[in-house]
Image (spheres, grey):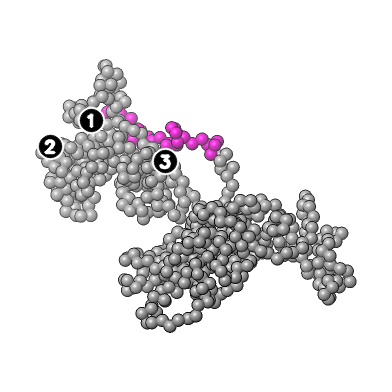
């Protein structure tokens, strides 16, 4: 209240009573969390226009059970303000999993990159990598989730086969997979864990359609647990179908950590239950920058295995309850009116933002300048609320100046704009208890000890929650004869009705202004373009040119002076232009007080025969 009192000491008028409101501004120190709160007056609220720059991204979801075919998601997101953490929550809702049950990684045929900072990574930056690598969501099994932090490794696994001809290079069959291994696993455990990645390849045709009793043996194999299936495929096989190789560091330049050879092309990992991954493999690594990788190498690839299944996936939105109907989607896109809702602009206005390096705030607790987080809110709204749409945008550090041409959708005519969610206190700025008494009390001497406290109050540090309901008459002695309450209304809602719009056509360098206004006498809309006034349809009031909006609070009656207006012509297919005084052949000026015009005729407010000039 004290900050409003200080404002009224310098500004008392009908304009203040009708148009001035209060901001609540909070600065929060990012280091000590000290909060500084001040209140400032305003005459109009400048709201930003959040541009909806949609992009789409492909994400592949790998189930913890490789038997399940991976999902492919194509999801839309807002370009400038969407992070991978937001994307993760969206996918989690679709697959009905907790976000902690999977993680993101970029996978290619040659390697993997695990995303470690989902909160700080913009989805759009991940989308830009799609030409080089794909984004995968990798689901963890309950066993993997239970592994204590620091006791496991997420290891890259490449799946290859021997070259088709002698001397050729190994052929990579699919993109790199990631498998979570405990450091205390035996090397035998590593084989069994990696086998789970490829078991699904055997399920359909093992042991091969050419074998006797194929259907019986295949059915029995499907019912085997993973442990028994591994014995069937690997331990009991005379010719082992695959082996696991350890990625070498040698590359012909240095000795391999695991075999000592310079020309090592990956070392074979022994199938040994007595050796552990930590003691017998990881302990040999000498370079902390070395990334431990393994290769599942098919030396004897069975003919019945279809390697194309490695890369098969299902479009998530092609089946099930989330199936997208292209026809319905097209109809929805054409039926939806394009534009940005004014509510989105108001929500964007109230979002906290961090101060820039060149605009730091001094924190009295930390004793240094900080890039504080600022939050600006509408604390109190006046009887007449002016909303200014920030259509002009200047890029920092550049001379580029652009105008935002998107249409902002706002309520017109009989619809109300509910400001309840966006205004902290629903009372009028003048509705402070004992405001008149404080304004007229004589100044008193203050002690030095009270001086600092008073200074804080004058800066708006005292937060007083008023107790009077919305729309109550002013306190006794306050001069607000031009406003009277017509009912308190719903205390949760704060409805405002549009009565005027200023339009801007052009750009930042030049342009043209017009306006729409609603006549309180006949309740009709009119368009004002220089000296011409024409009736307007309410549907044309909201347009991409809308620049400044004027709203009056519902529930407050404004005592406007009586004014005799001429009867306007009925709207026809051909719009009639009405010239204001001062336009046309007769400028409407009176020579004397009897209201006669230059030619001696009385200006009675009638329209000439040509229907253009209006005389007063």
The alpha-carbon separation of the residues under discs 1 and 2 comes to: 17 Å
Q: Quadrant of residue 27?
A: bottom left
Q: Residue at x 86, y 68 (%)?
A: 602
Q: Quadrant of the C terminus?
A: bottom right
First in residue order: circle 1 vs circle 2: 1
Query: Under tag 2, what secondary structure?
Result: loop
* Residue linked to disc 1: 226
* Foreground of the two, 71 or 536: 536
Which residue, as the protein is rendered here, is positioned at the far left?
Answer: 274
* Residue linked to disc 2: 273
Q: Residue at x 16, y 37 (%)?
A: 188
First in residue order: circle 1 vs circle 3: 3
Residue 323: within the magenta? yes
* Foreground of the two, 34 or 181: 34
Query: Under tag 1, what secondary structure?
Result: helix
Horizontally, residue 298 falls left or right of residue 375, namely: left
* Residue linked to disc 3: 73
The alpha-carbon separation of the residues under discs 2 and 3 comes to: 41 Å
* Foreground of the two, 64 or 373: 373
The alpha-carbon separation of the residues under discs 1 and 3 comes to: 29 Å
Residue 298: within the magenta? no
Judge whether 52 appears above or below 203 on screen: below
């Amino acid at each position: 209240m004290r900050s409003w009192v200080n404002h009224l000491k310098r500004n008392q008028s009908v304009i203040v009573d009708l148009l001035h409101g209060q901001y609540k501004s909070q600065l929060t120190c990012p280091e000590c969390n000290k909060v500084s709160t001040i209140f400032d007056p305003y005459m109009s609220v400048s709201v930003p226009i959040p541009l909806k720059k949609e992009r789409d991204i492909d994400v592949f979801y790998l189930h913890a059970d490789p038997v399940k075919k991976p999902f492919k998601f194509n999801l839309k997101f807002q370009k400038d303000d969407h992070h991978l953490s937001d994307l993760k929550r969206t996918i989690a809702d679709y697959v009905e999993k907790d976000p902690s049950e999977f993680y993101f990684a970029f996978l290619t045929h040659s390697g993997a990159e695990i995303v470690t900072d989902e909160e700080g990574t913009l989805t759009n930056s991940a989308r830009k990598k799609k030409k080089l690598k794909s984004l995968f969501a990798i689901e963890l099994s309950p066993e993997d989730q239970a592994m204590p932090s620091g006791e496991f490794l997420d290891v890259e696994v490449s799946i290859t086969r021997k070259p088709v001809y002698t001397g050729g290079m190994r052929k990579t069959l699919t993109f790199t997979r990631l498998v979570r291994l405990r450091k205390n696993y035996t090397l035998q455990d590593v084989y069994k864990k990696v086998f789970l990645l490829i078991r699904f390849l055997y399920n359909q045709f093992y042991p091969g359609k050419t074998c006797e009793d194929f259907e019986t043996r295949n059915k029995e194999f499907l019912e085997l647990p993973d442990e028994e299936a591994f014995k069937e495929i690997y331990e009991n096989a005379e010719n082992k179908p695959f082996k696991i190789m350890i990625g070498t560091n040698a590359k012909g330049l240095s000795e391999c950590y695991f075999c000592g050879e310079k020309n090592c092309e990956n070392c074979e990992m022994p199938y040994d239950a007595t050796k552990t991954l930590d003691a017998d493999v990881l302990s040999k690594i000498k370079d902390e920058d070395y990334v431990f990788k393994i290769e599942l190498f098919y030396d004897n690839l069975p003919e019945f295995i279809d390697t194309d299944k490695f890369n098969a996936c299902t479009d998530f939105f092609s089946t099930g309850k989330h199936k997208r109907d292209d026809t319905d989607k097209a109809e929805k896109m054409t039926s939806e009116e394009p534009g940005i809702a004014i509510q989105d602009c108001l929500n964007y206005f109230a979002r906290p933002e961090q101060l820039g390096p060149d605009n730091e705030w001094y924190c009295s607790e930390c004793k240094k300048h900080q890039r504080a987080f600022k939050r600006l809110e509408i604390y109190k709204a006046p009887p007449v609320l002016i909303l200014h749409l920030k259509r002009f945008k200047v890029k920092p550090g550049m001379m580029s100046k652009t105008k935002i041409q998107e249409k902002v959708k706002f309520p017109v005519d009989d619809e109300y704009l509910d400001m309840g969610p966006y205004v902290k206190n629903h009372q009028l700025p003048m509705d402070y208890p004992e405001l008149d008494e404080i304004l007229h009390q004589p100044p008193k001497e203050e002690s030095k000890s009270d001086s600092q406290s008073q200074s804080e109050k004058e800066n708006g540090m005292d937060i007083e929650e008023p107790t009077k309901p919305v729309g109550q008459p002013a306190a006794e002695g306050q001069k607000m004869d031009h406003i009277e309450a017509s009912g308190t209304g719903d205390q949760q809602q704060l409805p405002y009705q549009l009565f005027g719009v200023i339009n801007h056509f052009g750009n930042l360098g030049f342009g043209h202004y017009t306006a729409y206004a609603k006549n309180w006498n006949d309740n009709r809309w009119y368009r004002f373009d220089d000296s011409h006034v024409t009736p307007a349809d309410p549907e044309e009031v909201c347009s991409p040119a809308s620049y400044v909006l004027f709203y009056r609070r519902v529930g407050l009656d404004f005592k406007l002076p009586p004014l005799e207006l001429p009867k306007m012509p009925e709207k026809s297919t051909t719009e009639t232009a009405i010239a204001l005084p001062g336009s046309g052949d007769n400028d409407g000026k009176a020579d004397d007080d009897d209201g006669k015009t230059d030619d001696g005729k009385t200006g009675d407010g009638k329209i000439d025969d040509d229907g253009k000039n209006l005389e007063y």
